[in-house]
Amino acid sequence: MSGFIQHTPGYRKNYKLPLEKRLTSLGIIFFFLCLTQVYGQEDGSILWDSSHRLSWTDFKSPPPANSRIAATTASGIAYQFSALEQAGKMEVDCSIQAYFYPEASWYRPEVATDNILSHEQLHFDISELYARKMRTRVQGYTFSSNVKAEMRKIYSEILKELREFQSRYDEETNYSRAVEKQVEWNVMIAKALNKTSG
């Protein structure tokens, strides 16, 4: 899981998992064929797909005792790349995907509503939007022989931007309770996804 967790509604804890936990959770796998790096997703993760909408059955983790938060979405970006130097130029092939992590996502049935589920879906959609932003950035980048460090830098920048955007989303929509703002965000993200290639 390359990211952070969104809690809705109530106050929001949005944090990056410690590196040790992310490495363990993700099971980052290294394949060396030329120079190949694979940053994998957890088993059971859900790849973002425009035809798949989240349902409460996708939220597999039990809610913490005494939590007043209605739901938590864990989503993020995973990438893999391979690089080969040819004629003094680095050829980089990269795959970047957005994932939802059911085993780290939960909800409280007694307070969960369709509006909250829609809010959580948009967190996942925003992760996909930033996966596309990362793809665009990687496609336009001229890599040196230090591909691994350069990819990590791009990835770190994207994750920082993604966390800030997710925070802004929760603040402006008041965790789904500001209905008009929620509708505005739904439209804005749908338009942004339609403008970019999947």
Image (cartoon, rainbow, N blue to C red):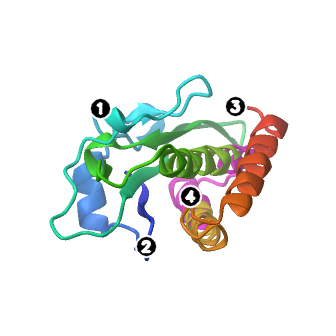
Precedes in sequence: disc 1 or disc 3: 1
Q: Quadrant of the C terminus?
A: top right
Q: Which residue sits at x=84%, y=39%?
A: 195
- Label 1 sits on residue: 44
In whole angstroms, how far apart are the C-alphas of marks 1 and 4?
A: 23 Å
Amino acid found under the numbered disc labelled 2:
Gly
Q: Which residue sits at x=36%, y=43%?
A: 101
- Label 4 sits on residue: 155
Q: Which mark is residue 198?
A: 3
In whole angstroms, how far apart are the C-alphas of marks 2 and 3?
A: 32 Å
Precedes in sequence: disc 4 or disc 3: 4
Instruction: Check the image and name the residue furthest to the left.
Output: 65
Amino acid found under the numbered disc labelled 1:
Gly
In whole angstroms, how far apart are the C-alphas of marks 1 and 2?
A: 28 Å
For the residue carrying disc 2, how many other residues have a C-alpha within 10 Å: few (<14), some (14-19), or many (20+)? some
Note whether 94 is above or below 157 in the view shown.
above
In whole angstroms, how far apart are the C-alphas of marks 2 and 4?
A: 29 Å
In this rendering, which labeled residue sits more in front, label 1 or label 2? 2
188 with respect to 112 (left or right)? right
All told, the count of numbered labels is 4
- Residue 152 inside the magenta-drawn segment: yes
Precedes in sequence: disc 2 or disc 3: 2
Give the main secondary structure, helix, strand or loop, of the magenta stretch: helix
In this rendering, which labeled residue sits more in front, label 2 or label 4? 2
- Residue 165 inside the magenta-drawn segment: no
Q: Which residues are magenta?
A: 133-157
Amino acid found under the numbered disc labelled 3:
Gly
Q: Which mark is residue 10?
A: 2
